Amino acid sequence: MIQFKKTITALLALLFVNSVILQAQLQAQHELINHSYDDKNKTTAKLLPLVGSLPSSGYMPFRLTLKNGTKFEKDWSLNFGSEGQNHYYYSGRNDHPTLTSEFSYTCPPESTKTYDILVPIVTSIPHSHTDIATSSLSIQLNSGGNTIHDSMNCEQHMEVPATLLSTKLYVPHNGTFNTHIPHSSRGYGSGSNDYTTEFTPANMPTDWRAFSGFDAIVCTDEDWREMTAEVKNAILEWNRLGGNIFIYKLNPASNLNSLQIDNSAENKNKASITRSFGKITITPLSSIKSLDVKQAVKLINGSTIEHPKILSLNENYESDITGSGTWSLQKALGKLSFSPIYLILILIAFGILVGPVNLFVFAKAGQRHRLFITTPLIALGASLLLVLLIIIQDGFGGHGQRVQLIEVRADGGENKAYVWQEQVARTGVILGGSFETSSATYLSPVPVAPSRFSRVTRNNGGGSSNYTAKHGDTGLSASGDWFQSRSVHGHYLESVISTRGRINLKSNEGAPMLNSSFDFELQSLIYIDATGQVWEASNIAAGETVKLTPSTPVESLKLIHKHHKNMSAKLQNKLDSLRKRKNHFIAISDEAPAISTLDSIKWTHTESIITGPVVK
Protein backbone atom coordinates (compact mmCIF):
# COMPACT_ATOMS: atom_id res chain seq x y z
CA MET A 1 0.00 0.00 0.00
CA ILE A 2 2.79 2.40 0.93
CA GLN A 3 4.55 1.62 -2.35
CA PHE A 4 1.31 2.21 -4.25
CA LYS A 5 0.85 5.63 -2.61
CA LYS A 6 4.44 6.54 -3.48
CA THR A 7 3.80 5.57 -7.11
CA ILE A 8 0.60 7.65 -7.29
CA THR A 9 2.39 10.59 -5.69
CA ALA A 10 5.24 10.32 -8.19
CA LEU A 11 2.81 10.15 -11.13
CA LEU A 12 0.90 13.18 -9.88
CA ALA A 13 4.14 15.09 -9.44
CA LEU A 14 5.21 14.13 -12.97
CA LEU A 15 1.86 15.25 -14.40
CA PHE A 16 2.17 18.54 -12.53
CA VAL A 17 5.67 19.15 -13.85
CA ASN A 18 4.60 18.27 -17.40
CA SER A 19 1.63 20.63 -17.17
CA VAL A 20 3.90 23.44 -16.00
CA ILE A 21 6.32 22.75 -18.83
CA LEU A 22 3.48 22.64 -21.35
CA GLN A 23 2.06 25.91 -20.06
CA ALA A 24 5.49 27.53 -20.30
CA GLN A 25 5.87 26.21 -23.85
CA LEU A 26 2.46 27.56 -24.84
CA GLN A 27 3.33 30.95 -23.37
CA ALA A 28 6.69 30.94 -25.11
CA GLN A 29 4.95 30.24 -28.40
CA HIS A 30 3.04 33.51 -28.03
CA GLU A 31 6.04 35.63 -27.05
CA LEU A 32 7.60 37.50 -29.95
CA ILE A 33 10.74 38.47 -28.05
CA ASN A 34 12.23 36.71 -25.01
CA HIS A 35 15.82 37.89 -24.69
CA SER A 36 18.32 37.51 -21.88
CA TYR A 37 21.23 39.97 -21.56
CA ASP A 38 23.36 37.70 -19.34
CA ASP A 39 24.01 34.02 -18.72
CA LYS A 40 21.96 33.89 -15.51
CA ASN A 41 18.79 35.57 -16.89
CA LYS A 42 19.07 38.40 -14.40
CA THR A 43 18.39 41.02 -17.07
CA THR A 44 15.71 40.11 -19.61
CA ALA A 45 13.15 41.64 -21.97
CA LYS A 46 9.94 39.93 -23.06
CA LEU A 47 7.44 41.24 -25.59
CA LEU A 48 4.07 39.49 -25.59
CA PRO A 49 1.33 40.26 -28.17
CA LEU A 50 -1.99 40.32 -26.33
CA VAL A 51 -3.97 39.14 -29.35
CA GLY A 52 -3.00 36.30 -31.64
CA SER A 53 -2.64 38.15 -34.93
CA LEU A 54 -2.19 41.61 -36.37
CA PRO A 55 -5.31 43.72 -37.12
CA SER A 56 -5.57 45.47 -40.48
CA SER A 57 -6.10 48.87 -38.84
CA GLY A 58 -6.27 50.50 -35.42
CA TYR A 59 -3.85 49.41 -32.71
CA MET A 60 -1.91 46.25 -31.84
CA PRO A 61 -1.68 45.63 -28.05
CA PHE A 62 1.57 44.33 -26.53
CA ARG A 63 2.86 43.74 -23.02
CA LEU A 64 6.54 44.47 -22.41
CA THR A 65 8.16 42.96 -19.29
CA LEU A 66 11.61 44.31 -18.39
CA LYS A 67 13.84 42.79 -15.71
CA ASN A 68 16.94 44.73 -14.72
CA GLY A 69 19.40 42.71 -12.66
CA THR A 70 22.13 45.35 -12.76
CA LYS A 71 22.90 48.00 -10.15
CA PHE A 72 22.22 50.78 -12.64
CA GLU A 73 19.13 52.14 -14.35
CA LYS A 74 18.69 50.56 -17.80
CA ASP A 75 16.91 51.97 -20.86
CA TRP A 76 15.07 50.18 -23.68
CA SER A 77 13.44 51.49 -26.85
CA LEU A 78 10.99 49.85 -29.23
CA ASN A 79 10.70 50.83 -32.90
CA PHE A 80 7.70 49.60 -34.89
CA GLY A 81 7.14 49.79 -38.62
CA SER A 82 3.62 49.01 -39.86
CA GLU A 83 3.13 48.46 -43.60
CA GLY A 84 -0.04 48.04 -45.61
CA GLN A 85 1.35 45.55 -48.10
CA ASN A 86 -0.62 45.83 -51.31
CA HIS A 87 -1.01 43.11 -53.89
CA TYR A 88 1.33 45.20 -56.03
CA TYR A 89 1.24 42.82 -58.95
CA TYR A 90 -2.02 44.47 -59.96
CA SER A 91 -0.42 47.86 -60.45
CA GLY A 92 3.08 46.74 -61.28
CA ARG A 93 4.41 48.76 -58.32
CA ASN A 94 5.40 47.96 -54.77
CA ASP A 95 4.33 51.29 -53.27
CA HIS A 96 2.48 50.93 -49.99
CA PRO A 97 1.68 53.11 -46.97
CA THR A 98 3.81 52.84 -43.85
CA LEU A 99 3.38 53.99 -40.25
CA THR A 100 6.28 54.16 -37.81
CA SER A 101 6.17 54.61 -34.04
CA GLU A 102 8.72 54.69 -31.24
CA PHE A 103 8.46 53.96 -27.51
CA SER A 104 11.04 54.39 -24.73
CA TYR A 105 11.09 52.69 -21.33
CA THR A 106 13.27 52.71 -18.23
CA CYS A 107 13.71 49.99 -15.62
CA PRO A 108 15.22 50.89 -12.21
CA PRO A 109 18.15 48.83 -10.90
CA GLU A 110 17.38 45.34 -9.56
CA SER A 111 13.67 45.54 -10.36
CA THR A 112 11.02 44.37 -12.83
CA LYS A 113 8.63 46.63 -14.76
CA THR A 114 5.66 45.78 -16.98
CA TYR A 115 4.24 48.10 -19.64
CA ASP A 116 1.17 47.77 -21.85
CA ILE A 117 1.79 49.23 -25.31
CA LEU A 118 -0.74 50.20 -27.97
CA VAL A 119 1.08 50.26 -31.32
CA PRO A 120 -0.65 52.26 -34.12
CA ILE A 121 -1.27 50.14 -37.22
CA VAL A 122 -1.55 51.66 -40.69
CA THR A 123 -4.89 50.95 -42.36
CA SER A 124 -4.55 48.39 -45.12
CA ILE A 125 -5.97 49.75 -48.40
CA PRO A 126 -5.89 46.96 -51.00
CA HIS A 127 -5.89 47.68 -54.68
CA SER A 128 -9.42 47.95 -56.08
CA HIS A 129 -9.10 44.53 -57.76
CA THR A 130 -8.83 42.56 -54.53
CA ASP A 131 -10.72 42.14 -51.26
CA ILE A 132 -7.70 40.88 -49.30
CA ALA A 133 -6.29 43.33 -46.75
CA THR A 134 -2.65 42.49 -45.99
CA SER A 135 -0.32 44.16 -43.53
CA SER A 136 2.88 43.57 -41.58
CA LEU A 137 4.61 44.91 -38.50
CA SER A 138 8.38 45.00 -37.99
CA ILE A 139 9.73 45.22 -34.44
CA GLN A 140 13.09 46.36 -33.09
CA LEU A 141 13.97 46.19 -29.40
CA ASN A 142 17.08 48.25 -28.59
CA SER A 143 19.13 48.45 -25.40
CA GLY A 144 22.80 49.30 -24.92
CA GLY A 145 23.69 48.73 -28.57
CA ASN A 146 21.93 45.34 -28.60
CA THR A 147 19.10 45.09 -31.16
CA ILE A 148 16.51 42.29 -31.38
CA HIS A 149 14.32 41.94 -34.48
CA ASP A 150 10.95 40.29 -35.02
CA SER A 151 7.84 40.74 -37.15
CA MET A 152 4.15 39.92 -37.59
CA ASN A 153 1.99 39.56 -40.70
CA CYS A 154 -1.71 39.22 -41.42
CA GLU A 155 -4.21 38.79 -44.20
CA GLN A 156 -7.91 39.54 -43.81
CA HIS A 157 -10.83 39.08 -46.15
CA MET A 158 -12.46 42.51 -46.02
CA GLU A 159 -15.94 41.00 -46.14
CA VAL A 160 -15.26 38.81 -43.07
CA PRO A 161 -15.58 40.41 -39.61
CA ALA A 162 -12.26 40.55 -37.75
CA THR A 163 -13.18 38.41 -34.74
CA LEU A 164 -11.48 37.97 -31.37
CA LEU A 165 -12.12 34.48 -30.00
CA SER A 166 -11.29 33.61 -26.39
CA THR A 167 -8.63 30.97 -25.81
CA LYS A 168 -11.18 28.52 -24.35
CA LEU A 169 -13.12 28.60 -27.61
CA TYR A 170 -10.17 29.16 -29.93
CA VAL A 171 -8.14 26.06 -29.04
CA PRO A 172 -10.83 23.44 -29.84
CA HIS A 173 -12.64 25.30 -32.66
CA ASN A 174 -10.31 27.62 -34.59
CA GLY A 175 -9.61 25.09 -37.33
CA THR A 176 -13.32 24.66 -37.93
CA PHE A 177 -13.87 28.42 -38.05
CA ASN A 178 -11.24 28.66 -40.79
CA THR A 179 -13.19 26.29 -43.04
CA HIS A 180 -15.91 28.94 -43.24
CA ILE A 181 -13.73 31.70 -44.71
CA PRO A 182 -15.31 32.61 -48.07
CA HIS A 183 -13.24 32.50 -51.22
CA SER A 184 -12.22 35.88 -52.53
CA SER A 185 -14.50 37.04 -55.32
CA ARG A 186 -12.33 39.91 -56.52
CA GLY A 187 -8.76 38.90 -55.93
CA TYR A 188 -6.32 36.40 -54.54
CA GLY A 189 -5.52 35.17 -51.09
CA SER A 190 -2.77 32.99 -49.74
CA GLY A 191 -5.17 30.84 -47.75
CA SER A 192 -3.04 31.38 -44.67
CA ASN A 193 -5.38 33.88 -43.01
CA ASP A 194 -7.55 32.98 -40.03
CA TYR A 195 -11.20 33.72 -39.45
CA THR A 196 -10.55 34.34 -35.75
CA THR A 197 -7.83 35.81 -33.58
CA GLU A 198 -7.06 34.32 -30.18
CA PHE A 199 -7.16 36.41 -27.02
CA THR A 200 -6.98 35.62 -23.31
CA PRO A 201 -9.74 37.67 -21.60
CA ALA A 202 -7.99 37.93 -18.22
CA ASN A 203 -4.83 39.24 -19.93
CA MET A 204 -6.24 42.14 -21.96
CA PRO A 205 -5.43 45.89 -21.76
CA THR A 206 -7.72 48.45 -20.16
CA ASP A 207 -7.96 50.78 -23.17
CA TRP A 208 -10.75 50.59 -25.78
CA ARG A 209 -8.25 51.33 -28.57
CA ALA A 210 -6.71 47.85 -28.07
CA PHE A 211 -9.90 46.43 -29.64
CA SER A 212 -10.44 49.12 -32.29
CA GLY A 213 -9.10 47.03 -35.19
CA PHE A 214 -11.65 44.26 -34.61
CA ASP A 215 -15.36 43.92 -35.35
CA ALA A 216 -16.45 41.27 -32.86
CA ILE A 217 -15.49 39.57 -29.60
CA VAL A 218 -16.65 36.02 -28.88
CA CYS A 219 -16.22 34.54 -25.39
CA THR A 220 -18.02 32.57 -22.69
CA ASP A 221 -19.67 33.91 -19.55
CA GLU A 222 -16.76 32.37 -17.62
CA ASP A 223 -14.32 34.39 -19.76
CA TRP A 224 -16.29 37.54 -19.06
CA ARG A 225 -16.18 37.00 -15.32
CA GLU A 226 -12.40 36.48 -15.44
CA MET A 227 -11.86 39.98 -16.80
CA THR A 228 -11.10 42.84 -14.45
CA ALA A 229 -13.62 45.66 -14.17
CA GLU A 230 -11.24 47.94 -16.11
CA VAL A 231 -10.98 45.50 -19.03
CA LYS A 232 -14.76 45.07 -19.14
CA ASN A 233 -15.17 48.84 -19.18
CA ALA A 234 -12.74 49.15 -22.12
CA ILE A 235 -14.62 46.47 -24.07
CA LEU A 236 -17.97 48.10 -23.33
CA GLU A 237 -16.62 51.46 -24.54
CA TRP A 238 -15.46 49.75 -27.75
CA ASN A 239 -18.92 48.16 -27.95
CA ARG A 240 -20.57 51.59 -27.79
CA LEU A 241 -18.41 52.65 -30.76
CA GLY A 242 -19.70 49.79 -32.90
CA GLY A 243 -17.95 46.64 -31.70
CA ASN A 244 -20.13 43.56 -31.28
CA ILE A 245 -19.94 41.19 -28.30
CA PHE A 246 -21.11 37.57 -28.42
CA ILE A 247 -21.23 35.75 -25.09
CA TYR A 248 -21.95 32.02 -24.84
CA LYS A 249 -23.37 31.31 -21.41
CA LEU A 250 -22.35 27.98 -19.90
CA ASN A 251 -24.30 28.88 -16.77
CA PRO A 252 -28.07 29.08 -17.53
CA ALA A 253 -28.43 31.74 -14.83
CA SER A 254 -26.07 34.17 -16.58
CA ASN A 255 -27.74 37.31 -17.93
CA LEU A 256 -27.00 40.96 -18.61
CA ASN A 257 -27.51 41.82 -14.93
CA SER A 258 -25.37 39.05 -13.43
CA LEU A 259 -22.60 39.75 -15.95
CA GLN A 260 -22.66 43.42 -14.90
CA ILE A 261 -23.33 44.64 -18.42
CA ASP A 262 -26.79 46.17 -17.98
CA ASN A 263 -28.46 46.61 -14.59
CA SER A 264 -31.89 47.61 -15.89
CA ALA A 265 -34.76 45.26 -15.07
CA GLU A 266 -36.27 45.43 -18.58
CA ASN A 267 -33.09 44.14 -20.24
CA LYS A 268 -32.19 41.54 -17.61
CA ASN A 269 -33.21 38.45 -19.58
CA LYS A 270 -32.94 39.77 -23.13
CA ALA A 271 -30.84 37.68 -25.51
CA SER A 272 -29.65 40.72 -27.46
CA ILE A 273 -29.44 44.46 -26.82
CA THR A 274 -28.21 47.43 -28.83
CA ARG A 275 -25.79 49.76 -27.04
CA SER A 276 -25.24 52.94 -29.04
CA PHE A 277 -23.50 51.80 -32.25
CA GLY A 278 -22.84 48.16 -31.19
CA LYS A 279 -24.71 45.10 -29.96
CA ILE A 280 -24.36 42.43 -27.30
CA THR A 281 -25.78 38.94 -27.85
CA ILE A 282 -26.00 36.19 -25.21
CA THR A 283 -26.50 32.60 -26.43
CA PRO A 284 -26.89 29.41 -24.35
CA LEU A 285 -24.16 26.76 -24.69
CA SER A 286 -24.21 23.39 -22.94
CA SER A 287 -20.44 22.91 -23.15
CA ILE A 288 -17.45 24.37 -24.97
CA LYS A 289 -17.06 21.23 -27.09
CA SER A 290 -20.67 21.42 -28.25
CA LEU A 291 -20.26 24.80 -29.94
CA ASP A 292 -21.89 24.72 -33.37
CA VAL A 293 -19.30 26.66 -35.38
CA LYS A 294 -21.51 26.95 -38.44
CA GLN A 295 -24.23 28.62 -36.38
CA ALA A 296 -21.63 30.79 -34.64
CA VAL A 297 -20.32 32.05 -38.00
CA LYS A 298 -23.89 32.69 -39.13
CA LEU A 299 -24.51 34.66 -35.93
CA ILE A 300 -21.32 36.74 -36.28
CA ASN A 301 -21.86 37.39 -39.99
CA GLY A 302 -25.57 38.08 -39.54
CA SER A 303 -27.48 41.27 -39.15
CA THR A 304 -25.52 42.25 -36.06
CA ILE A 305 -22.46 42.99 -38.24
CA GLU A 306 -23.43 45.59 -40.84
CA HIS A 307 -20.02 45.84 -42.47
CA PRO A 308 -16.56 44.92 -41.22
CA LYS A 309 -14.63 48.08 -40.36
CA ILE A 310 -11.85 47.49 -42.90
CA LEU A 311 -14.47 47.11 -45.67
CA SER A 312 -16.24 50.31 -44.61
CA LEU A 313 -12.97 52.25 -44.53
CA ASN A 314 -12.14 51.12 -48.04
CA GLU A 315 -15.53 51.46 -49.71
CA ASN A 316 -17.49 54.21 -47.92
CA TYR A 317 -15.58 57.25 -49.13
CA GLU A 318 -14.96 56.72 -52.83
CA SER A 319 -16.98 58.30 -55.57
CA ASP A 320 -16.29 58.36 -59.27
CA ILE A 321 -14.53 61.19 -61.03
CA THR A 322 -17.85 62.76 -62.10
CA GLY A 323 -18.59 63.37 -58.43
CA SER A 324 -21.47 60.91 -58.03
CA GLY A 325 -20.93 58.44 -55.22
CA THR A 326 -21.62 57.56 -51.62
CA TRP A 327 -19.71 60.35 -49.85
CA SER A 328 -20.98 63.83 -50.64
CA LEU A 329 -18.68 65.50 -48.09
CA GLN A 330 -15.87 65.48 -50.66
CA LYS A 331 -18.15 67.15 -53.17
CA ALA A 332 -18.91 69.86 -50.61
CA LEU A 333 -15.32 71.07 -51.04
CA GLY A 334 -16.24 72.27 -54.51
CA LYS A 335 -14.36 71.81 -57.75
CA LEU A 336 -10.61 71.70 -57.37
CA SER A 337 -8.61 73.19 -60.21
CA PHE A 338 -5.28 74.77 -60.99
CA SER A 339 -5.19 77.40 -63.71
CA PRO A 340 -2.28 76.67 -66.08
CA ILE A 341 -2.29 80.12 -67.72
CA TYR A 342 0.18 81.79 -65.36
CA LEU A 343 2.35 78.67 -65.35
CA ILE A 344 2.54 78.75 -69.16
CA LEU A 345 3.40 82.45 -69.14
CA ILE A 346 6.20 81.92 -66.60
CA LEU A 347 7.62 79.01 -68.66
CA ILE A 348 7.51 81.10 -71.86
CA ALA A 349 9.23 84.01 -70.12
CA PHE A 350 11.81 81.63 -68.67
CA GLY A 351 12.51 80.19 -72.13
CA ILE A 352 13.00 83.63 -73.62
CA LEU A 353 15.26 84.85 -70.81
CA VAL A 354 17.42 81.75 -70.54
CA GLY A 355 17.73 81.49 -74.33
CA PRO A 356 18.05 84.49 -76.67
CA VAL A 357 18.07 87.23 -73.98
CA ASN A 358 20.71 85.38 -71.99
CA LEU A 359 22.88 84.68 -75.02
CA PHE A 360 22.58 88.06 -76.78
CA VAL A 361 22.10 90.50 -73.91
CA PHE A 362 23.35 89.18 -70.56
CA ALA A 363 26.22 87.07 -71.92
CA LYS A 364 26.79 88.30 -75.45
CA ALA A 365 29.79 87.41 -77.56
CA GLY A 366 33.03 87.88 -75.69
CA GLN A 367 31.24 87.60 -72.32
CA ARG A 368 30.09 83.97 -72.42
CA HIS A 369 31.65 83.33 -69.04
CA ARG A 370 28.72 85.26 -67.55
CA LEU A 371 26.48 82.27 -68.43
CA PHE A 372 27.79 80.59 -65.28
CA ILE A 373 26.17 83.40 -63.26
CA THR A 374 23.15 84.52 -65.31
CA THR A 375 21.73 81.05 -66.06
CA PRO A 376 21.47 79.96 -62.39
CA LEU A 377 20.05 83.36 -61.44
CA ILE A 378 17.37 83.13 -64.15
CA ALA A 379 16.48 79.58 -63.07
CA LEU A 380 16.32 80.65 -59.41
CA GLY A 381 14.09 83.58 -60.28
CA ALA A 382 11.74 81.35 -62.28
CA SER A 383 11.57 78.86 -59.41
CA LEU A 384 10.72 81.63 -56.93
CA LEU A 385 7.97 82.87 -59.26
CA LEU A 386 6.53 79.35 -59.49
CA VAL A 387 6.55 79.00 -55.69
CA LEU A 388 4.90 82.42 -55.37
CA LEU A 389 2.27 81.42 -57.93
CA ILE A 390 1.45 78.25 -56.00
CA ILE A 391 1.16 80.19 -52.73
CA ILE A 392 -1.10 82.80 -54.34
CA GLN A 393 -3.39 80.16 -55.85
CA ASP A 394 -3.43 77.61 -53.01
CA GLY A 395 -2.40 79.60 -49.94
CA PHE A 396 -0.99 78.10 -46.76
CA GLY A 397 -2.66 75.35 -44.76
CA GLY A 398 -5.96 74.34 -46.30
CA HIS A 399 -9.71 74.13 -45.82
CA GLY A 400 -12.05 71.26 -45.17
CA GLN A 401 -15.41 69.88 -44.06
CA ARG A 402 -16.24 67.65 -41.08
CA VAL A 403 -19.26 65.65 -39.91
CA GLN A 404 -19.76 63.90 -36.58
CA LEU A 405 -22.18 61.35 -35.19
CA ILE A 406 -22.05 61.51 -31.39
CA GLU A 407 -23.73 59.33 -28.80
CA VAL A 408 -23.85 61.08 -25.41
CA ARG A 409 -24.39 58.74 -22.45
CA ALA A 410 -25.22 60.72 -19.35
CA ASP A 411 -27.07 57.74 -17.82
CA GLY A 412 -25.64 55.00 -15.62
CA GLY A 413 -22.82 57.23 -14.46
CA GLU A 414 -20.97 57.01 -17.80
CA ASN A 415 -20.85 60.73 -18.66
CA LYS A 416 -19.09 60.02 -21.95
CA ALA A 417 -19.45 61.01 -25.57
CA TYR A 418 -18.80 58.35 -28.20
CA VAL A 419 -17.67 60.07 -31.39
CA TRP A 420 -17.54 58.98 -35.00
CA GLN A 421 -15.98 61.72 -37.15
CA GLU A 422 -15.41 61.96 -40.90
CA GLN A 423 -13.47 64.75 -42.55
CA VAL A 424 -12.01 65.77 -45.89
CA ALA A 425 -9.59 68.61 -46.56
CA ARG A 426 -8.02 70.33 -49.57
CA THR A 427 -4.54 71.56 -48.68
CA GLY A 428 -2.40 74.33 -50.07
CA VAL A 429 1.19 74.74 -48.92
CA ILE A 430 1.79 72.79 -45.70
CA LEU A 431 4.79 74.14 -43.78
CA GLY A 432 4.44 71.68 -40.89
CA GLY A 433 2.41 68.48 -40.86
CA SER A 434 2.70 67.61 -37.16
CA PHE A 435 -0.35 67.66 -34.89
CA GLU A 436 -1.85 66.07 -31.81
CA THR A 437 -5.51 65.09 -31.60
CA SER A 438 -7.55 66.65 -28.81
CA SER A 439 -8.36 63.24 -27.29
CA ALA A 440 -7.23 59.61 -27.43
CA THR A 441 -8.19 58.73 -30.98
CA TYR A 442 -8.46 56.01 -33.58
CA LEU A 443 -7.30 57.80 -36.75
CA SER A 444 -7.29 56.34 -40.24
CA PRO A 445 -6.77 57.72 -43.74
CA VAL A 446 -9.54 56.77 -46.15
CA PRO A 447 -9.33 56.32 -49.93
CA VAL A 448 -11.19 59.14 -51.69
CA ALA A 449 -12.32 59.69 -55.26
CA PRO A 450 -9.39 59.54 -57.70
CA SER A 451 -8.13 62.90 -58.94
CA ARG A 452 -4.84 64.69 -59.57
CA PHE A 453 -4.99 65.92 -55.96
CA SER A 454 -5.97 62.62 -54.26
CA ARG A 455 -3.01 60.95 -52.52
CA VAL A 456 -4.87 57.94 -51.06
CA THR A 457 -7.18 55.97 -53.37
CA ARG A 458 -8.11 52.36 -54.03
CA ASN A 459 -6.55 52.73 -57.47
CA ASN A 460 -3.10 53.32 -55.96
CA GLY A 461 -3.58 50.94 -53.03
CA GLY A 462 -3.24 53.73 -50.48
CA GLY A 463 -0.22 55.24 -52.20
CA SER A 464 3.24 55.42 -50.70
CA SER A 465 2.41 57.71 -47.79
CA ASN A 466 4.73 57.65 -44.79
CA TYR A 467 2.98 58.29 -41.48
CA THR A 468 4.29 58.50 -37.94
CA ALA A 469 2.24 58.31 -34.74
CA LYS A 470 2.79 58.02 -31.01
CA HIS A 471 0.90 58.70 -27.82
CA GLY A 472 0.95 62.38 -26.84
CA ASP A 473 -0.11 64.34 -23.80
CA THR A 474 -3.77 64.66 -24.81
CA GLY A 475 -4.23 62.32 -27.74
CA LEU A 476 -2.50 60.81 -30.75
CA SER A 477 0.63 62.72 -31.76
CA ALA A 478 1.06 62.40 -35.52
CA SER A 479 3.30 63.67 -38.31
CA GLY A 480 4.29 62.75 -41.84
CA ASP A 481 1.90 62.44 -44.75
CA TRP A 482 -1.45 62.71 -42.93
CA PHE A 483 -1.69 66.10 -44.69
CA GLN A 484 0.48 66.71 -47.77
CA SER A 485 0.79 69.96 -49.70
CA ARG A 486 -1.61 70.56 -52.58
CA SER A 487 -3.63 67.41 -51.90
CA VAL A 488 -7.04 66.09 -50.95
CA HIS A 489 -7.10 63.96 -47.78
CA GLY A 490 -9.94 62.12 -46.09
CA HIS A 491 -9.86 60.74 -42.55
CA TYR A 492 -12.05 58.68 -40.26
CA LEU A 493 -11.77 59.14 -36.48
CA GLU A 494 -13.22 57.55 -33.35
CA SER A 495 -12.91 58.69 -29.77
CA VAL A 496 -14.37 58.36 -26.27
CA ILE A 497 -14.52 61.71 -24.48
CA SER A 498 -15.58 62.51 -20.91
CA THR A 499 -18.41 65.04 -20.85
CA ARG A 500 -20.96 66.65 -18.54
CA GLY A 501 -23.14 67.65 -21.49
CA ARG A 502 -26.67 66.22 -21.47
CA ILE A 503 -30.33 66.88 -22.19
CA ASN A 504 -32.38 66.96 -18.99
CA LEU A 505 -36.14 66.44 -18.76
CA LYS A 506 -37.37 69.27 -16.51
CA SER A 507 -41.10 68.69 -16.84
CA ASN A 508 -43.28 66.07 -18.50
CA GLU A 509 -46.66 67.64 -17.83
CA GLY A 510 -48.28 68.57 -21.11
CA ALA A 511 -45.61 69.61 -23.56
CA PRO A 512 -42.18 68.41 -22.29
CA MET A 513 -39.64 70.94 -21.09
CA LEU A 514 -35.99 70.10 -21.75
CA ASN A 515 -32.78 71.72 -20.55
CA SER A 516 -29.50 71.62 -22.48
CA SER A 517 -26.31 71.53 -20.44
CA PHE A 518 -24.12 71.47 -23.56
CA ASP A 519 -21.82 74.49 -23.79
CA PHE A 520 -22.77 75.20 -27.40
CA GLU A 521 -25.98 76.05 -29.25
CA LEU A 522 -28.25 73.38 -30.71
CA GLN A 523 -29.88 74.51 -33.95
CA SER A 524 -32.52 71.77 -33.85
CA LEU A 525 -33.66 69.08 -31.42
CA ILE A 526 -36.01 66.11 -31.76
CA TYR A 527 -37.31 64.21 -28.72
CA ILE A 528 -39.30 60.96 -28.73
CA ASP A 529 -41.07 60.44 -25.42
CA ALA A 530 -42.01 57.16 -23.70
CA THR A 531 -45.26 56.90 -25.70
CA GLY A 532 -43.54 57.41 -29.07
CA GLN A 533 -44.78 60.99 -29.52
CA VAL A 534 -42.31 63.16 -31.44
CA TRP A 535 -41.47 66.66 -30.17
CA GLU A 536 -39.15 69.35 -31.49
CA ALA A 537 -37.44 72.62 -30.64
CA SER A 538 -34.94 74.94 -32.33
CA ASN A 539 -32.15 77.38 -31.48
CA ILE A 540 -31.49 76.13 -27.96
CA ALA A 541 -28.73 78.14 -26.32
CA ALA A 542 -26.23 76.64 -23.89
CA GLY A 543 -27.91 76.08 -20.53
CA GLU A 544 -31.36 77.08 -21.83
CA THR A 545 -34.64 75.35 -20.87
CA VAL A 546 -37.22 75.18 -23.68
CA LYS A 547 -40.79 73.97 -24.06
CA LEU A 548 -41.17 71.56 -26.99
CA THR A 549 -43.82 71.60 -29.69
CA PRO A 550 -45.44 68.51 -31.26
CA SER A 551 -44.00 67.09 -34.46
CA THR A 552 -44.42 63.95 -36.59
CA PRO A 553 -42.13 61.05 -37.52
CA VAL A 554 -42.23 62.22 -41.13
CA GLU A 555 -41.08 65.74 -40.26
CA SER A 556 -38.35 64.47 -37.94
CA LEU A 557 -37.12 62.10 -40.66
CA LYS A 558 -36.94 64.97 -43.16
CA LEU A 559 -34.89 67.02 -40.71
CA ILE A 560 -32.47 64.15 -40.03
CA HIS A 561 -32.01 63.38 -43.72
CA LYS A 562 -31.41 67.05 -44.45
CA HIS A 563 -28.51 67.16 -42.04
CA HIS A 564 -26.95 63.71 -42.45
CA LYS A 565 -26.54 63.90 -46.23
CA ASN A 566 -22.78 64.52 -46.00
CA MET A 567 -22.17 61.45 -43.82
CA SER A 568 -20.94 58.21 -45.29
CA ALA A 569 -23.50 55.49 -45.98
CA LYS A 570 -22.43 53.65 -42.83
CA LEU A 571 -23.06 56.59 -40.52
CA GLN A 572 -26.36 57.35 -42.25
CA ASN A 573 -27.54 53.77 -41.74
CA LYS A 574 -26.38 53.80 -38.12
CA LEU A 575 -28.26 57.02 -37.39
CA ASP A 576 -31.39 55.67 -39.08
CA SER A 577 -31.26 52.63 -36.81
CA LEU A 578 -31.07 54.86 -33.71
CA ARG A 579 -33.61 57.55 -34.54
CA LYS A 580 -36.72 55.67 -33.29
CA ARG A 581 -35.48 55.09 -29.72
CA LYS A 582 -37.95 56.23 -27.08
CA ASN A 583 -36.86 58.64 -24.33
CA HIS A 584 -33.97 59.68 -26.58
CA PHE A 585 -33.11 62.90 -28.40
CA ILE A 586 -31.42 63.81 -31.67
CA ALA A 587 -29.86 67.27 -31.90
CA ILE A 588 -28.11 69.11 -34.72
CA SER A 589 -25.35 71.64 -34.12
CA ASP A 590 -22.67 73.37 -36.18
CA GLU A 591 -20.91 74.63 -33.04
CA ALA A 592 -20.07 71.36 -31.28
CA PRO A 593 -16.31 70.85 -30.87
CA ALA A 594 -14.75 68.19 -33.09
CA ILE A 595 -11.67 66.02 -32.64
CA SER A 596 -8.90 68.40 -33.66
CA THR A 597 -6.11 67.50 -36.08
CA LEU A 598 -3.84 69.87 -38.07
CA ASP A 599 -4.14 73.46 -36.82
CA SER A 600 -3.42 75.04 -40.21
CA ILE A 601 -6.54 73.47 -41.76
CA LYS A 602 -9.51 75.85 -41.64
CA TRP A 603 -12.61 73.72 -41.16
CA THR A 604 -15.22 75.81 -42.95
CA HIS A 605 -18.09 73.70 -41.64
CA THR A 606 -18.42 71.09 -38.89
CA GLU A 607 -21.83 69.45 -38.69
CA SER A 608 -22.61 67.37 -35.61
CA ILE A 609 -25.59 65.10 -35.05
CA ILE A 610 -25.82 64.28 -31.36
CA THR A 611 -28.05 61.61 -29.87
CA GLY A 612 -28.54 59.87 -26.56
CA PRO A 613 -31.00 59.32 -23.70
CA VAL A 614 -32.84 62.20 -22.06
CA VAL A 615 -31.94 62.26 -18.37
CA LYS A 616 -34.72 62.67 -15.84
Image (tube, grey):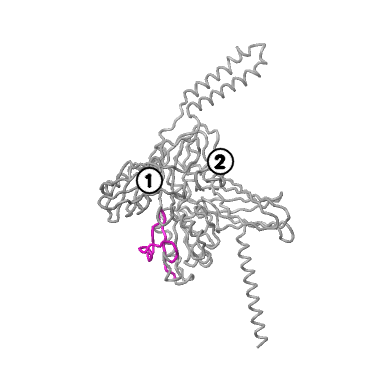
In the image, is residue 86 above or below residue 32? above
**Picture quadrant where residue 560 is located:** top left
Q: State which quarter of the image contains the N terminus.
A: bottom right
Q: Nearer the viewer, mark 1 or mark 2?
A: 1
- Reading the image, the residue beneath label 2 is 479
The residue type indicated by label 2 comes to Ser
The range drawn in magenta is: 258-285
Mark 2 packing: few (<14 Cα in 10 Å), some, or many (20+)? many
Could you say whether the residue bearing mark 1 is in a helix, strand or loop?
A: strand
Q: Position of residue 290 (x, y in %)?
A: 46, 71
| Magenta highlight: main SS | loop
Residue 560 visible: no
Residue 281 falls inside the magenta stretch: yes
The residue identified by callout 1 is 609
Residue 106 placement (x, y as % from top left): 66, 51
| Mark 1 and mark 2 residues within 8 Å of each other at the beta carbon | no
Circle 1: is it few (<14), some (14-19), or many (20+) Cα within 10 Å?
many
